[in-house]
Image (cartoon, rainbow, N blue to C red):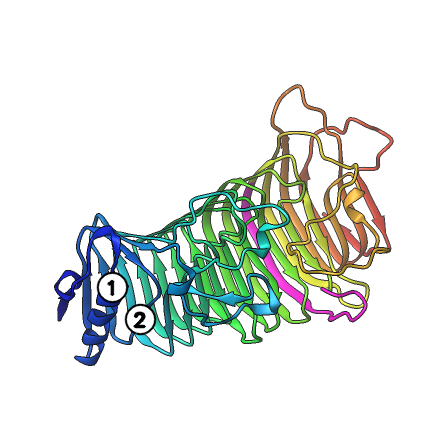
Amino acid sequence: MILDITQYGACSNGVDLAHEPIQRAIDACAEAGGGTVYFPAGTYLCGTIHLRSHVCLHLDQGAVILGADDASLYPEICKTPYGNLPGQIQALLWADHVTNVTIMGQGVIDGGGNSALSGADSVHVKFRPALIFYRNCEKVKFLDVTLQYSCFWTLHLLRCNEVLIRGLTIVAHQDRINTDGIDPDGCRNVIISDCNIKTGDDCIVIKSTEGDPCENTTITNCVLSSRHAALKIGTEAIGDIRNITFNNCVIYNTNVALALYMKDGSTYENIIFSNMVAEAYNEFPIVIDITPRYYKEPKIGNIRSVIFDNVILTGKGRVYIEGVENGPVTDIAMRNVTWNITGPCKLENIRKPDGARRIDIDPNRINYAEQPYQLIAAHVDGLLISNWKVFLHAEQQKMDRGRFYLKSVDDLTIEKVRFPQQQSSELPPVQMIDCQLQVK
């Protein structure tokens, strides 16, 4: 069954509201047992559209679902997690407890957020609807469409199972807060592939905002650019996150490339980053960090069994790995890493990336970020550094840092590393404090 939305009265002029006739077409399709709701070329101005089971939205080339700039057209679905602003979740497209639902085609879904929204006051803007929000859904697909200019998270999937996301183009305004690309949140059995994502916030970020485990997820063959993190786990993770692979991705013009932030006392385990080419400008473009969200009432989580393999990174920055004294990061392997250093490291007023705004960190904590080393690792049990090659990007550069700063690192293996000659002979190439080391 194929139902054309224009046959239900949907106007394609981009001026007259079209969501009510579109909703009638979706409802009719669902009540008939399912099928395809077809969007021919044109611009359809809409408020919230509610998706139904066994319905496929097919957006033909030239078809645009455009979010209307009218808060009254977006009912509140639920509250935002963690009490975060804007306080409520609204969405242009949403689904709840549906199965076998697809959005596909060469068309565009546009949230209308193509303007800057940043600075201290921006978080208090109440009307910031997500582009797509699915909750408690099974067997969902997103194929080939363009998702652009969301006012909040672009594609948020909460407690969904059997998810396929393939061939999407996602674009958000580079100077607009909270414009994540894809947020699998407490989801299981997720495939994300062949996507091109450029966002003002994280590109792909795996979360567990309500305590549901997020597991069995693979992200592959994506091209990513972000003002924040390209590939990230956390910071919002009440539930465990496990069995995650990131593979064959190209990251460019990005702040942090690869990050795991533990704040809420859960466990991250069995995670692989492989075959990555990244260009990142943060002082620490690779981060693994356990820092409780509230230092006065700390919840100490676990990060364990993480592998980085075949990573080429260009930028001025360094690697940062930190557990806590009674909760070390465990079993980390960094193999076959090539680093092209493009400039001097920053030491003055430098701190590790926190990955979140809503935190209360111990003001008296040790600031390891000030150490002038290419890799900083503190409170780690099981660290393998193998086959590292570090180059200076320009001949006139000087090697302004040492190799490894290691504090309370047990079961440590370093083998086959190559670094340029250091500028300062006063700085030891490797500084170890309370470590157990094997060098090969």
**Residue at (76, 34) in percent of width and height:** 401
Mark 2: few, some, or many residues within 10 Å (few <14, many ≥20)?
many
In the visual, does 192 lie left or right of 264? left
Query: Mark 2 is on which residue type?
Result: Leu
* Separation of residues labelled 2 and 1 (CA atoms): 9 Å
In the visual, does 173 lie left or right of 401? left
Tell me which label, 2 or 1, sits earlier in the chain. Answer: 2
Q: Which residues are magenta?
A: 293-312
The quarter of the picture where residue 365 lies is bottom right
Is residue 383 one of those drawn in magenta? no
Residues under numbered marks 2 and 1 in contact, where contact means CB atoms less than 8 Å apart: yes
Instruction: Tell me where residue 115 appears, x and y as whole percent.
Output: 46, 43
In the visual, does 129 lie left or right of 164? right
The quarter of the picture where residue 95 lies is bottom left
Residue that label 2 marks: 51
Question: Residue 57 shows which numbered tag?
Answer: 1
Of 133 and 373, the residue lying toward us: 133
Is residue 300 one of those drawn in magenta? yes
